[in-house]
Amino acid sequence: NAGVTQTPKFQVLKTGQSMTLQCAQDMNHNSMYWYRQDPGMGLRLIYYSASEGTTDKGEVPNGYNVSRLNKREFSLRLESAAPSQTSVYFCASTSSLGQNNSPLHFGNGTRLTVT
Amino acid sequence: LAKTTQPISMDSYEGQEVNITCSHNNIATNDYITWYQQFPSQGPRFIIQGYKTKVTNEVASLFIPADRKSSTLSLPRVSLSDTAVYYCLVGLNNFNKFYFGSGTKLNVKP
């Protein structure tokens, strides 16, 4: 039981390049999330998926797209990376749909640098 | 969703009890209060959750007054390894949106 797994752990991109951050969870959770954390700051919600087949915007969705591929996987895509997207990206999941108040489980993050 | 306010940072010494207070004046009736801990280079980790009065687990206690407009995370006898950022979140899981504030950076000194 690995929990929430994110790949890659590190990535360096040039401005304008694209890439997809991968996230998978093996806890049979319904809801999944993508956050970004800039140095010395709190986490900001980019997108979330309440259940398989649905996605919604969070606080800072501009410049990103997401895909809930199946119940286990939720990917985050940067179509044209910008230096302002340099950050640490965290994926999280939680059980919902009848199980109240289950906590968020986080991956270990992807450190992205855009030059 | 209810917005939270926490102190930006706190200092403590090993062996002391640390209390971190979070204000959430517009908490909704169905909202729960959840605290997370984050170490450098790691994702946040769940510590404790409560709805009212007091909750205690092996790691911490959570005190919630009757009006629920604030909550206090209590860490007994902290050690150096408790140096981390602590986040307070307010919201009901079924709303499916969890917003983090800036958190409280706790620095435990020897």
Image (cartoon, grey):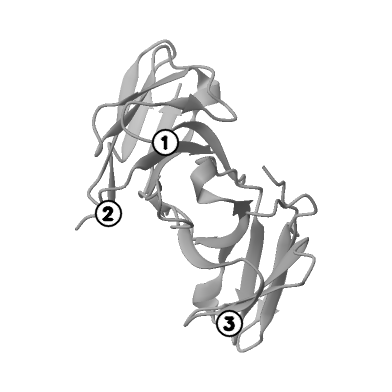
Chain of the residue under the numbered disc 3 shown in the image: B
Are tags 3 and 1 found on a single chain?
A: no
Mark 1 secondary-structure assignment: loop
Mark 1: give few (<14), some (14-19) or many (20+) Cα within 10 Å.
many
Task: Please provide percent x and percent y for residue B84.
Answer: 55, 64
- Figure quadrant of residue A69: top left
Are tags 2 and 3 found on a single chain?
A: no
Mark 2 — residue?
A: A3
Q: Residue at x 63, y 69 (%)?
A: B107
Q: What is the distance, in whole Å, between disc 1 and disc 2 at their CAs?
A: 18 Å
Of residues B56 and A7, the one nearer the viewer is B56
Say the numbered circle drawn on residue B78: 3
Name the amino acid, label 3: Val
Chain of the residue under the numbered disc 2 shown in the image: A
Q: Is residue B37 above or below residue B59?
A: above
Mark 1 — residue?
A: A50
N-terminal-most mark, 1 or 2: 2
Is there a contact, CB below 8 Å, between mark 3 and mark 1?
Answer: no
Q: What is the distance, in whole Å, between disc 2 and disc 3 at their CAs?
A: 28 Å
Disc 2 or disc 3, which is closer to the eye?
Answer: 2
